[in-house]
Image (cartoon, rainbow, N blue to C red):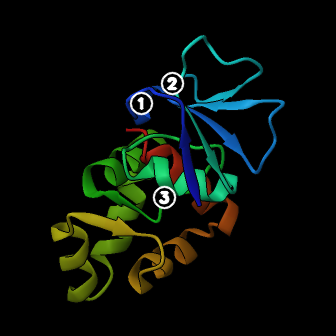
């Protein structure tokens, strides 16, 4: 549930949130952190949880208090991350040794989804544990 208080016009990029009824601190969309005091005249909204706030802010491309590992990245981000980690040649060699379906998917996909079966096969072939896959997608999403 979201409850907006104050007379300010709602602007998600520069707004303050009381999360879960805790009035000792306020989530600042602009600072991407909790702050202890509200600026004079600041707009404030009550929201039930950090999870709900993160969902609301993500609609505007803003970061909430809960970090979520992206479930997909663009092909560009994915391949640049492979390059940054020194894996591009190894992965492209593995792809070349696979069937046509994997080769076509790798060469023509606009996005790479972490839970897709071909993606899981590739990460398994690389020996990536789930934590390393999380770290890879997190880093790739910033490229």
Task: Please state the horizontal and vertical placement of residue 79, each as a whole percent of the image.
Answer: 32, 52
Residue 44 in sight: yes
Q: Is residue 86 left or right of residue 105?
A: right
Identify which residue is drawn at 36% across, 45% down. 60
Marks 2 and 1 in Cβ contact (< 8 Å): yes
Q: Report the Cα–Cα distance between label 3 and label 1.
A: 21 Å
Q: Report the Cα–Cα distance between label 3 and label 2.
A: 21 Å
Identify which residue is drawn at 32% across, 79% down. 97
Q: Which mark is residue 30?
A: 2
Q: Quadrant of the N terminus?
A: bottom right
Marks 3 and 1 in Cβ contact (< 8 Å): no
Q: Earlier in the sequence, mark 2 or mark 1?
A: 1
Task: Please state the horizontal and vertical placement of residue 52, each as a whole percent of the image.
Answer: 60, 58
The image quadrant of residue 92 is bottom left
The image quadrant of residue 90 is bottom left
Q: Residue furthest front?
A: 7
Q: Which residue is more in the foreground, 107 or 54?
A: 54
Task: Please state the horizontal and vertical placement of residue 95, each as a whole percent of the image.
Answer: 32, 73
Task: Please state the horizontal and vertical placement of residue 105, each as a whole percent of the image.
Answer: 23, 77
Q: Is residue 44 left or right of residue 34?
A: left
Residue 68 in sight: no
Q: Residue furthest top?
A: 40
**Mark 3 sits on what residue?**
70
The image quadrant of residue 51 is bottom right
Q: Earlier in the sequence, mark 3 or mark 1?
A: 1
Marks 3 and 2 in Cβ contact (< 8 Å): no
**Mark 1 sits on what residue?**
13
What SS does tag 2 mark? loop
Q: Quadrant of the C terminus?
A: top left
Q: Earlier in the sequence, mark 3 or mark 2?
A: 2
């Amino acid at each position: 549930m979201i409850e907006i208080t104050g007379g300010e016009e709602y602007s998600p990029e520069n707004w303050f949130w009381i999360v879960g009824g805790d009035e000792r601190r306020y989530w600042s969309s602009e600072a991407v952190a909790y702050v202890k005091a509200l600026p004079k005249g600041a707009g404030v909204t009550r929201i039930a949880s950090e999870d709900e706030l993160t969902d609301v802010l993500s609609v505007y491309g803003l970061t909430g208090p809960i970090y979520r590992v992206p479930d997909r990245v663009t092909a560009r981000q994915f391949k640049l991350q492979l390059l940054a980690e020194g894996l591009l040649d190894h992965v492209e060699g593995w792809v070349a040794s696979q069937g046509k379906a994997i080769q076509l998917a790798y060469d023509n996909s606009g996005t790479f989804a972490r839970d897709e079966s071909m993606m899981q096969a590739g990460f398994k072939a690389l020996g990536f544990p789930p934590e390393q896959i999380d770290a890879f997608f997190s880093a790739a999403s910033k490229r």
